[in-house]
Amino acid sequence: MVDRTPPPWGPGDPRLRHSVQPAPEQLRVTHADRDAVADRLKEAYADGQLDHEEFEERLDLAMGAKTRGELQPLLLDLTLERPSGGAAPASPFAAGTAEPEPEREERLWALGTHLSGYLTLALGPLVVLLVKGNTSPYLRRQAMEALNYQLNFLIASILLPIIAVLTLGIGLVVYLFMAFGWAVLPAIAGIAGALGYNWRYPLTLRIVKDRERRV
């Protein structure tokens, strides 16, 4: 009887299938990769290459990307500022340029930053931004996101009587939905921050923008 068992590492060996390397654009990205692309988009927005809607759309896509193939098209049509000396800007995926994963202390601060809005509205995130914003890029983003959301809710609360009168009560209904979101969304953002994710509040006008970080 002829032995038809395929030789080790032959075409029939399942280990061979798992050894095939995926294409570069199929590689999974890390939080640091997403953050690097987000920083480039902020730079392009500050330079006027993207309007507000384009910036928000691309930033949302960057934060939700899973592979390099999803991130790379977000930067293809942008002219990024060259560093001194005329050298081309480094790729966001280049070794040594990616931001490290947030440490445990940073994640705990992020959790507290979002939850502080329940007691202090915008004051808590503002204090964290001023005190810790320059020590951790991750915590700076978390504080700015929480600050912008709380500012949106605070402004809406102040303008509620005027809006309710002008809209014949419709504005009050909208505000009730906002109040429900205020009761839930900071907790979601805090949990996401504690897990190391850059979660973004939906339907939020980014009043405070980060102009300091330049790639």
Image (cartoon, rainbow, N blue to C red):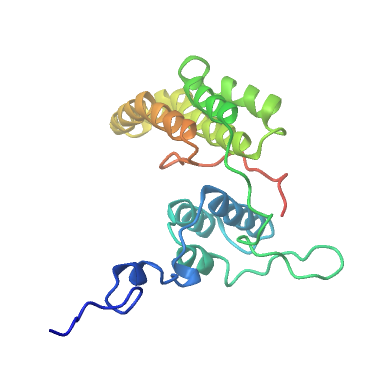
Total number of numbered labels? 0
Does residue 106 sit above or below 210 in this rendering? above
Say left or right for 50 vs 167. Answer: right
Q: Residue furthest front?
A: 1
Percent across and percent down for residue 200 are: 46, 41
Q: Write the residue at 52% across / 48% down.
A: 31
Q: Which residue is nearer to you in this view: 134 or 182?
A: 134
Q: Write the residue at 67% across / 56% down.
A: 43
Q: Quadrant of the C terminus?
A: bottom right
Q: Which residue is nearer to you in this view: 143 or 208?
A: 143
Q: Which residue is nearer to you in this view: 180 or 166?
A: 180
* Figure quadrant of residue 209: top right
Q: Which residue is nearer to you in this view: 161 or 68?
A: 68
Does residue 110 sit above or below 199 in this rendering? above
Q: Quadrant of the N terminus?
A: bottom left
Q: Write the residue at 37% across / 33% down.
A: 166
Q: Write the residue at 57% across / 42% down.
A: 101
Percent across and percent down for residue 183 are: 36, 23
Percent across and percent down for residue 178 are: 36, 30
Percent across and percent down for residue 210 are: 65, 43
Q: Residue furthest left?
A: 1
Q: Residue furthest top?
A: 119
Q: Residue furthest right?
A: 85
Does residue 73 sit above or below 101 in this rendering? below
Say left or right for 22 vs 175. Answer: right
